[in-house]
Amino acid sequence: MLTVHVREKHYADRGGRRHLALRDLRLSAEDGEFVCLVGPSGCGKSTLLNIIGGLDATAQASVDLDAGAAAEDVGFMFQEPRLMPWLTVRQNVCLVCDGRPGAEQRALELLRAMELGEVVDAFPGALSGGMQRRVALARAFVIEPRLLLMDEPFVSLDAPTAARLREMLITLWQRRRATVLFVTHDLREALALADRVCFLSASPGRIVLEHRIDLPRPRDPQSVEVGRRYEELLSRHPGLLAGLGGDNQDAA
């Protein structure tokens, strides 16, 4: 189980003034749970992922993953694919493996599952944006992470490509059952993916509402069921996407 408590996180703006990004934020996730984080721009969602992933040591925070878990058990997928242009697709996926036994075979299996089997020896510059995101998704899963942090990984993609990547993500997650924290601005995407959606307040960010989802998978963000849940949620909490929350708990 993942438990997080960020007491305070400050950073300095360009003028040197201290800005309070997060305060008294508490978050937990069960093993294998898919949690989406939704909130207004600037509320600290990406900052929170960096703290959890160990990329920001300046916050007053505690992060506890199950006993025995290490930094090598945490995978990342960012807004940009972040592929090394001088490495092939196969080499980019294996880059995070650090010599783990069977890593190259897992990489090839994942790339085939991503429908990239014919371009494993190509360089990223030869791939479309959607294909590069698929490589990044394969790289995120190749270490078989216990915790996967995803920071708006499908933003700016066209709708069909994003839909295909969401399908691939859910397929891989159901097979390997990592705990996933997925940041998105798109509430429909969150409702289509998550077991639970956590809504953050405006800065300084904290969790103001948690909403569990009992809809069967697979889910389409544009489906009637997701649309109905979307409308019901915003009807009960009209300021939610602006960071104005309710009673911190919301039944599915």
Image (cartoon, rainbow, N blue to C red):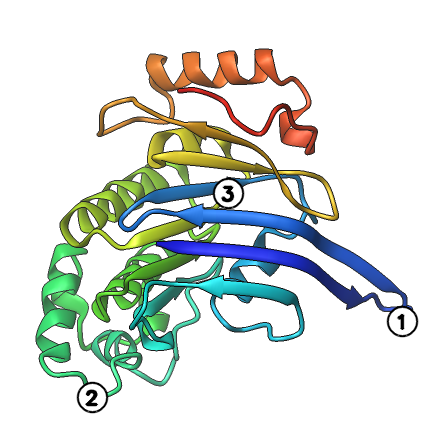
Give the residue pinned by disc 2: 99
Q: Is residue 202 left or right of residue 61?
A: right
Residue 248, image x and y in percent?
58, 29
Is residue 155 visible to us here?
Answer: no
Residue 160, image x and y in percent?
33, 37
Give the residue pinned by disc 1: 16
Seen in the picture, residue 87 relative to 129 is either above or below; the reply is below
Give the residue pinned by disc 3: 37
Specify the label residue 184 is tagged with. none
Residue 251, image x and y in percent?
44, 20
Amino acid bearing label 2:
Gly
Q: Earlier in the sequence, mark 1 or mark 3?
A: 1
Seen in the picture, residue 96 relative to 28 is either above or below; the reply is below
Front position in the image: 248 or 168: 248
Q: Is residue 26 left or right of residue 166?
A: right
Circle 1 SS class: loop
Q: Is residue 20 left or right of residue 161?
A: right
Is disc 3 in contact with disc 2, using a CB cutoff of under 8 Å?
A: no
The residue drawn where x is 30% and y is 23% is 214
Disc 3 crowd rating (10 Å Cα; few below 14, some 14-19, many 20+) is many
- Spatial CA span between label 3 and label 2: 33 Å
Seen in the picture, residue 90 relative to 145 is either above or below; the reply is below
